[in-house]
Amino acid sequence: MANSVAEVMPTARSEHLAGAAAPGGQAFEALEPILRRYHRSPDSLIEILNQSQELYGHLSDDLLRHVAGSLELPLSRVHGTASFYHLFRFRPPARHSCVVCNGTACEVKGAAPLIEALEQELRIGLGACSADGWVSLGSVRCLGTCSAAPVVVIDGAVRKHQTVSSVLAAVRELDAEHGPEGEAEPQP
Amino acid sequence: MSVRTLSINGHAVAMATGTTLLAAAREVGVPIPTLCHLEGLSPVAACRLCLVEIEGSGKLQPACLTPVAEGMVVHTDTPRLQDYRRTVIEMLFTEGNHVCAICVANGHCELQDRAVEVGMDHSRLPYRHPDRPVDLSHPLFGLDHNRCILCTRCVRVCDEVEGAHVWDVGWRGEHCRIIAGLNEPWGAVDACTDCGKCVQVCPTGALFDKADTTGEKHADPARLGALVRARARGQQTR
Amino acid sequence: MTTLSQAHASPTPSSPSPTSVMRVRCCSSAGCLAGGAAELRQGLTAAVARRELQERVAITGVGCLGPCSQGPLLAIDPDGTLFAGVTAADADGLIAALAHRLQAVSAAEWEAPLAWRPAAGEQVDTGRPFFTRQRRVVLENCGLIDPERIEAAIERGAYEQLRHTVTDRTPAEVVDTIRRSGLRGRGGAGYPTGLKWATVAKMPGERKVVVCNADEGDPGAFMDRSVLEGDPHRVLEGMAIAAYAVGADQGFIYIRAEYKLAIVNLRRAIEQARRRHLLGAGLFGSPFGFTVELRVGAGAYVCGEETALIHSIEGQRGTPRPRPPYPAEAGVWGRPTLINNVETLANVVPILREGAGWFAAIGTEGSKGTKVFCLTGKVRRGGLVEVPMGTSLATIVSEMGEGCPDGAGLKAVQTGGPSGGCVPASLLHTSVDYESLQALGTIMGSGGMVVMDHSTDMVAIAAFFMAFCRDESCGKCVPCRAGTVQLHGLLQKHLAGDATAADLAQLEALCPMVAETSLCGLGQSAPKPVLSTLRYFREEYVARLKPGPTAAAAGR
């Protein structure tokens, strides 16, 4: 999805160097067996990023720095590669995810009205995450389950033959759990 | 050394095996426009300005990468190629924010020169006015993404000649940006040696010396060739 | 070879006995799972346990059973009857019916049709054209075997051709067989497979690589997913035979991350084959060895392009590079590399088993064998079908797919995904082969076939595919990075009714420019959906134009 390039602000170099020296105490120990399995080979960068994201939910700067150091790769090479692929996240995921399939079959069978309805219901645009980290709305380019079109994936569960009323009912069920206090922090 | 004979725009040409069409054409005084190409850096064939027609080949071929071959008949300046080149330049102008009048590279800009060469007096395509940032975090140099054409010369010179690999391309498609480190402010990346080679090879005003103001940037990418040759001979340079 | 209806009917024992068994094959591919197939299978297993019928009724998961649009599907052996729309609530009733059947004492009772129907579903008539018009070569085991058990594949002859190849055939013989079979690449472009193998085999180099391209990114296509989910050993065996033929010792399967189940099944299959020494060093007592590694993509359509795929396997940005050098000369880590699509590799085993002549006898002059298609969109009976090359689009869409529902009338069929085009209803008599489709301005592509009825807006379809290409452009070369954005902008202008004749002229001028100057296949074919809709549905563009200074130009 459209990745907004982080605003680059003038910053004194020394401050950032100090920040880099103290990576917030995270040791990424769980990553060690994976790095070993791939012999710390730079060729395995994408595999390692895939599994890092599975372990930690998203690719933080500290995590990327750790991977770059372990594989002896330049930082820009690691970030350039990670940002190329749509499935890598640089921010923690929302608690719930709602993904509309945007493949040809789903398009022909009416994915667009589903997206429109979800955007209105969740009050966020496609590719965005609600401000409280509760839910994200995304799209995917064909899941290959075209016979079930149109398809919506909510929290990993694929729902076939969706209509506006069925998806709205499904996300309202999520809302029901939201509760009055509802200001839940996103999961790490 | 074996020689290949071929025809470029009707001129009979004899060139050493392995010579690229671009080098061969320049050797005999036939200009082929380029932007991403730079002597001394690995070729990427990304700007598509140097595409030429080769008789018998269904596809246009990039002159910067295609080696000369025996009996090749090459056309570098057909009406189709002229139109495509102008369109490429229009695409570059409309995808960024290129305002020559206030640019450090005004008058010394390769993009501007190419636009003049292809006769682009206006763009037939609509301007997209993207929202792009400026990075002034480095003490000596600046990076204005508005003027970047993603030729990746800076990426390649920093990696292949300086060996620092400060730069890379981040994201993809229309969202592509040159990034330093982990998409950090340039000044925060300690791999940077402040050598300034990226500024020297930048064809536009995207990378510039902070001391320069409008029209004052005099980058000299040709120095890179001398530097690479000197290194190959074992002479001390930096 | 079997037709699907034959394949579904296993030989029926002539008389019942206390040891007769019945088998329920539950479709466990991603399409049916979305409809609750996992719950159904759990329900069936539990019902069998409750009735203590574990010895008499086997519940197995299998790959795609075909008419996915009616899922979840299950088939019952030995009858071979197929049921659609079965839910977990039906489980107990079905097992009760099977239990009743197992008490049969006479042949008549044993052979009587099952007195059971799913509550909301139906029994599928396998005598319909959807089944009878198929010819299953690639999918011969799909839906019959349990993809989780290598024993099931071996029972059906898996790795037999690999053993035969390694022990009795020379690499040159294998290449020659594939060449004579006339097999062409099933990934879209249709390059002759034998020629590709011969090129890699001829390359000098101690170490070569075989890559299976399973980055099935075309929206509306799921053939490769179905093969990998339903019969993974077929692909592994094809890869190993290819490796033997070209002299490679290392293999990669590059698969898109969206295919979670296929990844799980493949990982398991690789491990099972390795344990049985069907992959690894010194196969069948020969010096030939071959290892396979899985590489999971991370969401980039362009990685289906061979050079981009190589970069991605090497852990880099998936950007294509100009060719030459071709992957056959310098691929993964600069080694000679053979890249074949999943379906191409799945054809290797039957070709070696039945012979090149047998394969070449199926299909047309220029396009041999069968092709798997995914029939989706506005079609009554959608799903996975395998037909001989040369079958007409009308046969596939109108006869097998039984046309459009809702009586809206068929308008066009889209093939080849974002690199293909739309074939109008008037040209449905066209035979499905590489050359005929190309002549219509589309391509065979990987096998997605999306049916559109008269409610489909063709300008919107063109804009949809351009949005896809814009999103998936790697950004390396200018015409694709900036050109797809400009083309998409122009199409949106048409959709909004703001375009003038001048905009239409610009759209038509930009299409060949992007096609001819882009670096790789993505940009080169990105304008195809626009060009094909302009060719057959130009009036839909013209009708939207608002009056402008050069209106005359648009009528040409």
Image (cartoon, coloured by chain):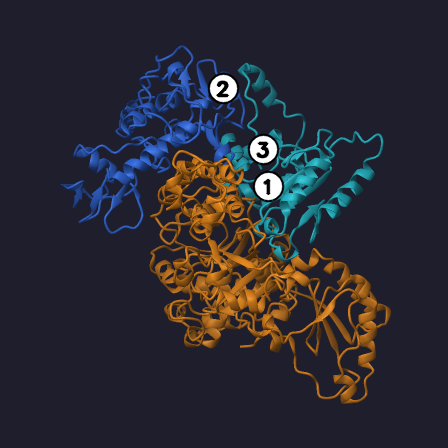
Chain colours: A cyan, B blue, C orange
Mark 3 — residue? A64
Crowding at mark 3 (Cα within 10 Å: few <14, some 14-19, many 20+): many
The label on residue B12 is none
Total labels: the figure holds 3
Crowding at mark 1 (Cα within 10 Å: few <14, some 14-19, many 20+): some
Are the residues tagged 1 and 2 within 8 Å (C-beta)?
no
Q: Distance between the Cα atoms at labels 3 and 2?
A: 24 Å
Q: Which of A6 and C272 is in front in this view?
A: A6
Q: Which amino acid does label 2 sit on?
A: Val
Locate residue C19 relative to residue B43 in the image: left or right: right
Q: Do labels 1 and 3 share a chain?
A: yes
Chain for disc number 3: A
Q: Quadrant of residue C367?
A: bottom left
Relative to B105, say whether A170 is above or below.
below
The label on residue A87 is 1
Q: Which amino acid does label 3 sit on?
A: Leu
What element does badge 3 sit on?
helix
Chain for disc number 1: A
- Residue at x 65% of width, y 79% of height: C10
Relative to C234, say whether C493 is above or below.
above
Say if residue A166 shows up in the picture. yes
Mark 2 — residue? B134
- Residue at x 29% of width, y 25% of height: B116
